[in-house]
Amino acid sequence: MRETWVAGAASGRFGRLSETGREAGTRVALEAIESAGLAPKDIDLTVVSNCFGIAERQAHVGPLLNTGLGIPEVPSLTVESACSSSSAGLHEAYVHVAGGFADAALVVGFERLSHLDTLQATSYFAMGADYPFETRNGATFPGLYATLARAHAERFGTGPKELGAVAIKNHANGARNPHAHFQKEISESTYLGSPMIASPLRLYDCCPFSDGAAALVVVAREAHGDGPREPLVVRASVRSGSIADLQDRPELTGLPATRLAGRRAFQAAGIGPGDLDLLEVHDCFTIAELLALEDLGVYTPGRAGRAEVEGETARDARVPVNPSGGLKAKGHPVSATGASQVAEIFEQFNGTAGGRQVPHPEWALAHNVGATGGSCTVHIFGHR
Amino acid sequence: MRETWVAGAASGRFGRLSETGREAGTRVALEAIESAGLAPKDIDLTVVSNCFGIAERQAHVGPLLNTGLGIPEVPSLTVESACSSSSAGLHEAYVHVAGGFADAALVVGFERLSHLDTLQATSYFAMGADYPFETRNGATFPGLYATLARAHAERFGTGPKELGAVAIKNHANGARNPHAHFQKEISESTYLGSPMIASPLRLYDCCPFSDGAAALVVVAREAHGDGPREPLVVRASVRSGSIADLQDRPELTGLPATRLAGRRAFQAAGIGPGDLDLLEVHDCFTIAELLALEDLGVYTPGRAGRAEVEGETARDARVPVNPSGGLKAKGHPVSATGASQVAEIFEQFNGTAGGRQVPHPEWALAHNVGATGGSCTVHIFGHR
């Protein structure tokens, strides 16, 4: 296994694209390549994620993107794993590079759905659930995550105080992130006054539909050596799965895929949850951040909510969670999300995260979930 | 690099599915795993291809498929590269297994579009082309491949005799393949009497829209050793790209991605085109088979048509091409196609190809193209 780095990264501003997804993807790809001190001709493989490219009538987008980069001969593929698509793409890039099949791989995730109306966009998102057994019976993701939130509430008493703390903290972080979809703080009364979407989840418990693009450059240390920026050394790149449908799971107060990927990732990295200085976790709904922190072992089951309320996850606390603003405030352009989490950690490791900078993180974890946890990817990054 | 085998394979009958794509995929996956002498619990990774799952309102299908196989915890991803999706999936599985990241990987490709009308199905297929520059201007694949056929005709005099020879030969092979969509021979007069679709391509120059599913099991020799069937030893697994849009290519009488992948594959395998005993090539249109044979170096440019006319590519000739019937007669369920080519070679290596059996093939090549050659995958297989 070769030592493998994320040597470059870039993220556009999330929200609404005035260009096609592929144009946005090409732009961030060029920025990521430049940040790695490389040129497009150094890239051996392009791994694209663009779950809902069909909403732009475009499949097979890799060759178009590579042509735009001036490297049409380079192989490309599109990787889909619902909301964890571009972290799955990073894992594929990692396997190619660590295994010696490529020296430098480009990971690009982009999504554009804002040209659709909300109903159309919702129906695209819902394709990540099990159509015959969930979607066709009326379940969409707010309802499915509300089911998880209710189970957590019943067992641990998790309520608006705990869920609201996640929303308020992530909006506070997003307000300091120029890439974020929502750059405004919210108060507890704003949170509590927001309409109920799927009880107990209010509007401010839900991440938005966002357009956006993010890109990473993955290299073998032995092939490309030091670049202009501080790299993320990939200490663990782990993927897992679980029973996709909630109705078939033995319990609903955690995501089994996160538990499995987390356990294996800490084993691979040789560290424990207590060693982390920074986490970017999958908070498509506020409850998801609590589940992530408990399933990863950062907090014992039922304890994450109190930690959020007490400020233990804030940007200036010992272990900040989602300093980027998370999916909740930074936004959730499905296929760009996983790559953007890693792009945030890249800025944090380089000390270039501006108003949301975390002081000198040594170890960071990125956690990205597909749908309600049918898939999960966990990456752990350290320094050279 | 660990020695890597395709140790199991299965293909359903192509044509029209009366079940969902995912049900068909689960069925062939179980058959492929059984043919490898393994159980689902032996699988470490599932690589799915299902380009147009959205036509069944289903993305993120890997966890659903794994759940059906009884291995929900196994990571999965969906790989798309237009018509070369499941050969790209095989390449990913190969990289994971050869690189030591998995001991056994399942590759499954399935597609179901027959519940749509022809216009809808065409519009899905067309998403593999460049939307703003090709599709939006009216170009669909019959027209794009007709453009390639015209360029070949102008330079080499390729006409209905040469194109028809491909169609007639592949239908003759399909008539002996119980998995084929079209199991009937056609005569030269039937070919010539078929309506013009996009001049010079007639109806019988075009592959059909098919539903279908195919699966492969990829293992490390050192991990799983001999199974019940003769394995395909992967001697080369190579992917490439090219400028996707025809209008931007310097010439149109061949596909640059095939040339590049072919050259690298022969180099990796340490053999030349003259060593092959059997080829499954991408004949979405008859012209594509001629381009493939010339771009791979089996015939010099402009010579493949005459070889087809003279019977050099027939099932009982020295080097049979598309004994399965090819995309032309076996059918083209987009995401199942690449895996089904390899499933055919698996049957041929095992001597279980029935009425279309090729005597004792030692070396075989599978060639799979995405769209008009924006992507290409070439695999070369030998024996233990």
Image (tube, coloured by chain):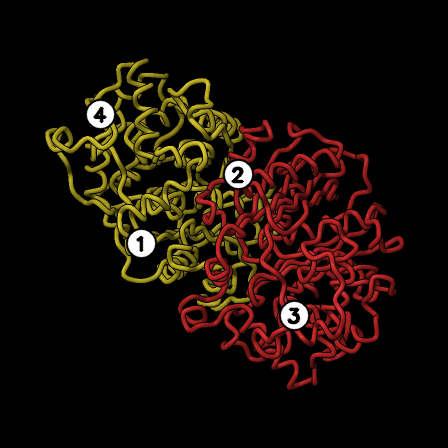
Chain colours: A yellow, B red
Cβ–Cβ under 8 Å for marks 2 and 3: no
Residue count near mark 3 (Cα–Cα under 10 Å), binned few <14, some 14–19, many ≥20: many
Share a chain, discs 2 and 3?
A: yes
Mark 2 vs 4: CB contact within 8 A: no
Respond whether the residues carrying marks 1 and 3 are from the same subunit. no
Label 4 vs label 3, nearer the camera: 3
Task: Give the chain letter at badge 2.
Answer: B
Asked if B207 appears above or below A345 in the picture, the reply is below
Question: Where in the figure is residue B75, as x and y percent of width and height?
Answer: 54, 35
Instruction: Return the residue at label 1.
Output: A12
Give how far apart the Cα atoms at labels 1 and 3 are: 45 Å
**In the image, what residue occupies the spot 48% across and 42% down?**
A88
Q: Amino acid at mark 2?
A: Gly
Q: Give me the C-alpha separation between circle 2 and circle 4.
A: 38 Å
User: Which numbered disc covers residue B205?
Assistant: 3
- Label 1 Cα crowd, 10 Å radius (few <14 / some 14-19 / many 20+): many
For discs 2 and 3, the disc positioned in front in the rendered view: 3
The residue mark sitting in front, 1 or 3, is 3
